Amino acid sequence: MLPGGYSSVLKAKDRDEFREEVIRFAQRLGFDTVAALTVVERGAAGTEFISVDNTPQEFSSTFRDSVLMRRDPVMQHCRKQSVPIIWDQQTYTGQGVGELWEEQAQYGYNTGIAMALHLPEGRHFVLGVDRDQPLPTDAGELQRLVADLQLFAVHAQEAALRLLLPEPLQPEKPALTPRELEALYWTMEGKTAWEVGAILGISERTAVLHVNNAMHKLGCVSKHAAVLKALRLGLIH
């Protein structure tokens, strides 16, 4: 379940190693630049943005401009949705902000793919990869790129929360029931809900309920993220 291309980011020991893994993965996919943005909403204290990226130095200040970020159609999509966005010049001109694309295209940001994971407690993780060459025209190849990015994002957000957020924001180890742990373990082994139910002697619906309860207790939005977090916390092996 955890091939090296995805799981190696989980082994990052600090911010620099995390950055290296994120850049390495993006370049393997054929993208020159990448940004992994961790967002934490702190209520009256405002919103904190923690970016790990390889943005060209001469474009760095523009890239981090919060005013421009609010006008950027890609960022606005990621702020509201979890569905990945495949963007190009038309994405910007269609929203009447073609000048933003013209500015970033000078630095190789011609097209790309971006997505967001919206987590509990006002936390978000945005991952975007960009390049100056057109994306594949073959639908199957493009779909594989999106799927690779989605799977990597699940792993990367686990590492980002561990390495980039202050210790007080790290959650306590949750108390999962034996059945919830068993359901997560067999999910880790690649079993479907029906197969988990058959192994544990319960209905498919009950197996789904156990996995959903585990996801809720772990503060995760998918079963894959729940498995990764349970592994990191030592709840399953």
Image (tube, rainbow, N blue to C red):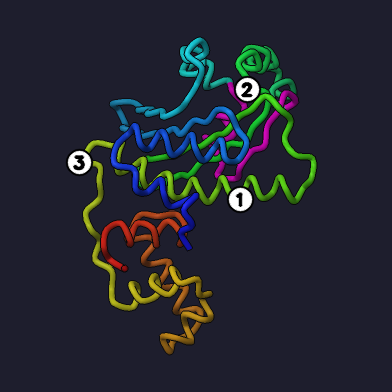
Q: Which residue is mark 3?
A: 168
- Where does the image place residue 126, in percent across and percent down from the top left? 48, 37
Which residue extends farthest right? 137
Magenta includes 82?
yes
How far apart in space, not on screen, are marks 3 and 1 (Cα)? 33 Å
Residue type beneath disc 1:
Ala
| Element carrying mark 1 | helix
Give the residues drawn in magenta, as a range: 72-90
Decide if residue 100 is on the left or right side of residue 15: right
Q: Which residue is mark 1?
A: 147
Mark sitting earlier along the chain (3/1): 1
Residue type beneath disc 2:
Tyr
Which residue is found at the position 33% from the left and 61% from the top? 231
Is 101 situated above or below 2?
Answer: above
Total numbered circles: 3
Label of residue 109 in the image: 2
- Where does the image place residue 58, in percent across and percent down from the top left? 51, 10
How far apart in space, not on screen, are marks 2 and 1 (Cα)? 21 Å
Mark sitting earlier along the chain (2/1): 2
Which residue is found at the position 25% from the left and 42% from the top? 169
